[in-house]
Image: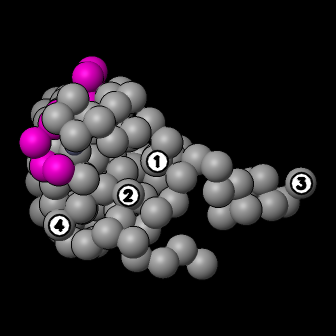
């Protein structure tokens, strides 16, 4: 099991803000979801912290539970014509998901940094353990 090697809360919040979890100054991403190889401010190797599919699952979990499930309590969703209601619901939902995903990935990378989990820790990858 991974031990906390850096302050967890600080690292996660720096990642959520899109900053390097080590120093908080450098940018974490160089594209939408592409993590910088090295921090431009403190030279921390950011590429070695694996995110895999975790941020996508967590984003779906958050958006699904905080937006989609409460939305189903509104009768207008059930009674309206799907030709009109689906675009009105799905387009903002997709935009929200795309807005949340990089923040969740940043927080995820910050958590991996705090826990000291690197891409070389293959024993922690369950898919590899199944082989
Ligand atoms: Zn840094």
Residue placed under numbered mark 3 in the picture:
131
Find out whether the residues at labels 1 and 2 contact each other: C-beta distance under 8 Å: yes
Residue placed under numbered mark 4 in the picture:
10
- Residue 72 sits in quarter: bottom left
**In the displayed structure, does residue 40 sit left or right of residue 105?**
left
Residue placed under numbered mark 1 in the picture:
49
Q: Which residue reaches farthest right?
A: 131
Q: Nearer the viewer, mark 2 or mark 3?
A: 2
Q: Does the image show residue 114?
A: yes
Q: Which residue reaches farthest front?
A: 42
Using the numbered discs, state the Cα–Cα distance from disc 1 to disc 3 in whole angstroms.
22 Å
Residue placed under numbered mark 2 in the picture:
113
Work out whether residue 108 or residue 37 is closer to the camera in this orientation and state it. 37
Give the mark nearest the N terminus, 1 or 4.
4
Work out whether residue 66 or residue 55 is closer to the camera in this orientation and state it. 55
Give the mark nearest the N terminus, 3 or 4.
4
**In the displayed structure, does residue 47 sit left or right of residue 42?**
right
Using the numbered discs, state the Cα–Cα distance from disc 1 to disc 4 in whole angstroms.
16 Å
Using the numbered discs, state the Cα–Cα distance from disc 4 to disc 2 in whole angstroms.
11 Å
Badge 3 marks a residue whose secondary structure is: loop
């Amino acid at each position: 099991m991974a031990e906390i090697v850096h302050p967890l809360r600080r690292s996660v919040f720096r990642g959520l803000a899109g900053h390097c979890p080590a120093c908080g100054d450098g940018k974490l991403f160089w594209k939408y979801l592409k993590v910088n190889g090295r921090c431009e401010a403190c030279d921390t190797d950011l590429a070695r912290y694996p995110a895999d599919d975790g941020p996508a699952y967590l984003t779906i979990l958050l958006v699904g539970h905080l937006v989609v499930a409460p939305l189903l309590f509104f009768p207008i969703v059930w009674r309206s014509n799907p030709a009109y209601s689906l675009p009105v619901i799905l387009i903002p939902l997709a935009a929200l998901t795309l807005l949340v995903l990089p923040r969740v990935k940043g927080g995820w990378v910050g958590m991996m940094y705090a826990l000291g989990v690197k891409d070389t820790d293959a024993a922690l990858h369950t898919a590899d353990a199944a082989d």
